[in-house]
Amino acid sequence: MVDSKRMGRRERGGSPSEGEGAGEGLTRRGLFRRLGVAGTAAALVNSSCKVQDGELEAPAVDLGPDTSGAFGLDAAPLNFTLDGKAVDTKAEARTTLLELLRLDLDATGTKVVCDRGACGACMVLVDGVARNSCMLLAHDVAGAEVTTVAGLGASGELSALQQAFVDHDALQCGFCTSGMLISASALLRKGGGPGKAAGMTAAQVEDGLAGNLCRCGTYPHVVAAVLSVAKGERVDRVPTERIALGEDGSKPARAQKGGAA
């Protein structure tokens, strides 16, 4: 007996399902599906294999990126110049330059404040360019010349810029001072050096120190100090009033301006 539902589908141009047509040979849908699979397989073979002297060669194996010279979790050798002295040390891949300077090399003039590159307190010169050491990996400076605030002046002496900071009372708590000096040094070098940038303006100094934040608000003093060095000026120490205790330690006495307490 003929299935009336199946006959109705065939009369309307439909095709039986896979399960219904399994015993009746290859259906039109099954034919197209097999042709598609065969075409895809042929394309994959042609794209990954080459024919050499009539023989099919196996596709080349991708071995991944070149890892020669890479290192893992263990500390790896690191060489660079710090404040004019050669440094031969080891550092893990994750160690920042700031951590290496302070914890391993005892270069504590570089300060830890925000630890996210926002305040500028950790700035150092890397080949003459001011950089945030908290945002650099230690191995980023391999072979480079790194200068901290301790390397700005000669041994035991202040640089002209450092002395100007003292003369203009441009430092208070000291946390921002190291980074300020580094940024100002880079700015003066760009302008030609101390005494050779007489045309430098306060706006240029403010722009050059835009990445350095001072919690004490000594910006006007810092700008004045940098401009004095740019013009080659040397001023006497800015007079300030200092309060000192009397000899008996009981009564504060106000010292004269510019005088000793």
Image: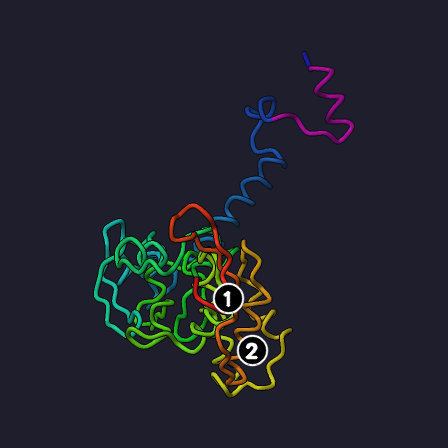
Q: Residue at x 41, y 66 (%)?
A: 124
Between marks 1 and 2 in the image, the one whose residue lies nearer the viewer: 1
* Residue 91 disc label: none
**Residue reaching furthest front?**
248
**Three-letter code, disc 2:** Leu
- For residue 68, what is the image quadrant? bottom left
Q: Residue at x 74, y 24 (%)?
A: 9
Q: Distance between the residues labelled 1 and 2?
A: 14 Å
Seen in the image, is 75 located left or right of residue 235?
left
Local SS, label 2: helix
Q: Position of residue 91 (x, y in %)?
A: 26, 56
**Three-letter code, disc 1:** Asp
- Residue 225 vs residue 186, the one in the foreground: 225
Number of numbered discs overlaid on the protein picture = 2
The reply to whether the magenta stretch includes residue 10 is yes
Q: On the image, numbered disc 2 is attached to which residue? A: 227
The local crowd at label 1, few if under 14, some if 14 to 19, many if 20 or more residues have their Cα within 10 Å, is some
Seen in the image, is 153 located left or right of residue 16?
left
**Residue reaching furthest right?**
12
Local SS, label 1: loop
Of the numbered discs 1 and 2, the one sitting upstream in the chain is 1
Q: On the image, numbered disc 1 is attached to which residue? A: 169
Image quadrant containing the N terminus: top right
The reply to whether the magenta stretch includes residue 180 is no
Seen in the image, is 206 located left or right of residue 152?
right
- For residue 67, what is the image quadrant? bottom left
* Range drawn in magenta: 3-17
Q: Where is residue 144 in the image (x, y as percent from the top left)?
A: 33, 72
Q: Residue at x 56, y 45 (%)?
A: 36
